[in-house]
Amino acid sequence: MKRHQTLQDLSREHHTALALALAARRAASSGDPQQVAATASHCVEVFAASLEPHFVVEETSLLPAMAQAGEQELVARTLAEHAALRALLTDLPAGDAVTLLRFADLLSAHVRFEERELFEVAQAGFAR
């Protein structure tokens, strides 16, 4: 299904997040502490440059509109996952594989949630 114009950029940005999650998962599973540390550092950089601005757009434009439309449960889940990802991000510089894998798993699950649930509900609202 083609995304509503309002969601297109956000949806495209999810590709970056999924690629980052895949790289993090691979590094965490590699058993190589240097690869884990390098990928954790890369995740911190990409998060600051791409994902945090993405979260801010969602939190300042999309989520308030959805809350106003009565979608408090979806909004609350989105905000909770954003907070959890930000919290994991603060632990990534330590460079441990467990945290990197948790970050990868949550990021991947979060993107899938947004694409399959949050954006579908938002898109239906735009069609009205």
Image: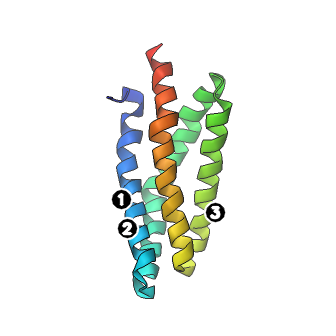
Q: Residues within 10 Å of mark 1 (few under 14, many from 20)?
A: few
Dot 2 and dot 1 residues touching (CB under 8 Å): yes
Q: Is residue 20 left or right of residue 62?
A: left
Left or right of 85, for residue 32: left
Q: Label 3: which residue?
A: 87
Give residue 19's mark: 1
Task: Specify the quadrant of the image occupied by residue 42.
Answer: bottom left
Q: Where residue 79 appears, x then y in whole percent? A: 63, 45
Residue 4 visible somewhere in the drawing? yes
Q: Is residue 16 above or below residue 91?
A: above
| Residue 91, image quadrant | bottom right
Does 46 appear above or below 72? below
In this view, 125 is above or below 92: above
Tag of residue 31: none
Q: Name the residue type under label 1.
A: Ala
Residue 116, placed above or below residue 14: above
Cα separation, mark 2 vs mark 3, equals 19 Å
Q: How is the image coloured?
A: rainbow
Residue 99 at what x, y percent from top left? 56, 72
Q: Position of residue 1 (x, y in %)?
A: 33, 29
Which residue, given by chain and number where applicable, does mark 2 sit on?
Answer: 23
Whole-number angstrom distance, CA of label 3 to CA of label 1:
20 Å
Q: Nearer the viewer, residue 53 or 101?
A: 101
x 60%, y 69%: residue = 90
Give the residue at x 36% y 27%.
5
Q: Amino acid at mark 2?
A: Ala
